[in-house]
Image (spheres, rainbow, N blue to C red):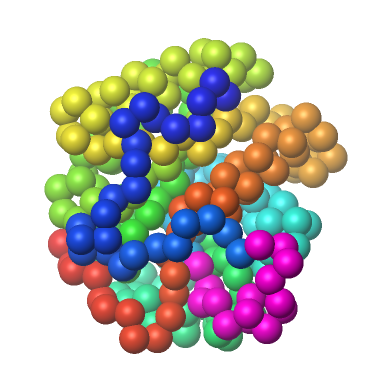
Amino acid sequence: MVSQLSPAWQRRPASSGRPARAHGQIPDGTPENTRDQAPCRAIPFLLDNAGQNRIVRQLAEVLNQRGHSASLYPPEQHPHACSAEELAAQAGLEHGKTEFCLLPFLSPHALQRWPLDHVVLLVPAELDAVLLAYRRIKLLSCTRPPDIGIVMIGPRDQHAAWRYFRKLAVGTLRYLDVPLLNLGFLPQQADSDHSTDDSYRHNFMTRISERLVGSEFCTPLQAGEEDREKP
């Protein structure tokens, strides 16, 4: 895409009520025992439709291929989770064993019940989907808004997708005071489920995974973390 960042996007300061997050990822030269001590990190996704579940599954596969232990955890199986500690326990994640836990949500109301400081919206590059994304961001911003990242999904015309992102980013910033992080563009997939066989699409999936990891766009899950305020 033309740019990774929305012009107004920046990390929220630690004083906003969220725990401070480290900048940058663990260097490849970091000893393995240091990696094992890091808490599992949750990356929630708010899907436009149920068919996008396979995008999250494919992203978990890409993260594993690149040396990051990642698992997919369907939140609808445990709709009453209310703390990061409970989430880590219910997902069956032993401390330090799983690096990333990917959580696909279909409803912003369900997402608000979870102790998450970030969310990635998968937004098709079309007007109706952009309007739906705006309404969802407005709903999320009514309580304790998470940091919001956007992945645009559409035909191979990235410039058209970028224009839709700009419309969404300008609207949320101007009317909701919510900046967005552009996490990248993903070409539409054919009906077949052979994502990793499509090298062109796989390259975009890899870039998205790198941005997620490199920007620390995730919520650490560890014992003792304070419960997020309920809406």
**231, 62: nearer the viewer:** 62
Residue 184: image quadrant is top right
What span is colored magenta in the figure? 27-41
**Image position, residue 134 (x, y; %):** 29, 32
Give the residue at the far front of this rendering.
29
The residue at the point 55 percent across, 77 percent down is: 38
Q: Is residue 194 above or below residue 116?
A: above
Taking 200 as reference, is 40 above or below it?
Answer: below
* Percent of width and height locating residue 201: 73, 33
Can residue 55 be seen?
no
Q: Is residue 178 left or right of residue 194?
A: left
Is 197 colored magenta in this rendering?
no
User: Which image quarter: residue 178?
Assistant: top left
Please say whether residue 29 is one of the residues in the magenta stretch: yes
Work out which quarter of the rendered image holds the C terminus and state it: bottom left
Left or right relative to 178: residue 168: right
Quarter of the figure with residue 82: bottom left
Q: Residue at position x 41%, y 38% from top?
A: 181
Of residue 213 and residue 102, the one placed in the foreground of this image is 213
Tell me the residue at 68%/83% (across/down).
33
